[in-house]
Every structure is written in C-alpha cells, then in structure tokens.
Amino acid sequence: MTSSELQLVTSLSPKSKQLFRKQFIYPSVEAGLIAMTHPDNPRHPQQKYYLTELGLAVLKVLTKEEKI
C-alpha cells in the first residue's frame, strides 16, 4: 500500500501526510512491522509498504484478541 492508502485505512491517522509518516510509518519501519519497497529512497514516487513476517505475526495476534 502507498502511504496515502495506509492513511485512509487507519482510523487514528492524522490528516497531515508528513505527520502520518512521522508518527506511524517511520516507527513501524524501525520496529520491523512494515518494510518499504524502495528502502534506499524513502521518497520514491512508487514507494509502497508491506507487512513483514513480524508484522504478520502481530496482526494475527491482534485479530485473535478481537475475536475473544
């Protein structure tokens, strides 16, 4: 997903694209939850993000907790 797509699906996201990157995208990348398709160029026009193995595991745990 692009950062704009992520911002749309995240209900807690700030309206500013820069603030969204600073508060959500960069910490998630640093934590290893998501990864960039173009890590050498964060502002690449076709930059997208995807869940890492760790991100998938966390998502699985979170969805299990929501069902309880």
Image: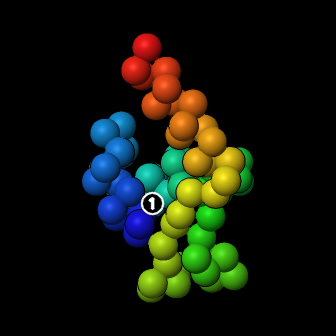
Question: What count of labels does the image hold?
Answer: 1
- Which sits in the foreground, 29 or 16? 29
Q: Is residue 54 visible?
A: yes
Residue 51 lies in what quarter of the image?
Answer: bottom right
Question: Can you say whether 31 is above or below 60 in the image?
Answer: below
How is the rendered protein coloured?
A: rainbow
Residue 14 lies in what quarter of the image?
Answer: top left
- Which sits in the foreground, 11 or 17? 11
Q: Whole-percent x and y of residue 10?
A: 35, 45
The quadrant in which the N terminus is found is bottom left
Residue drawn 50% across the image and 57% down it: 21
Q: Is residue 26 visible?
A: no
Q: Whole-percent x and y of residue 13?
A: 36, 44
The quadrant in which the C terminus is found is top left
Q: For the residue labelled by badge 1, is the local secondary structure a helix, a strand or a loop?
A: helix
Q: Which residue is label 1 attached to?
A: 18
Question: Can you say whether 47 is above or below 22 in the image?
Answer: below
Relative to residue 12, is residue 44 drawn left or right? right
Dot 1 surroundings within 10 Å: few (below 14), some, or many (20 or more)? few
Residue 16 lies in what quarter of the image?
Answer: bottom left
Q: Amino acid at mark 1?
A: Gln
Relative to residue 2, is residue 55 drawn left or right? right
- Which sits in the foreground, 39 or 59? 59
Residue drawn 48% across the image and 73% down it: 48
Relative to residue 61, is residue 17 drawn left or right? left
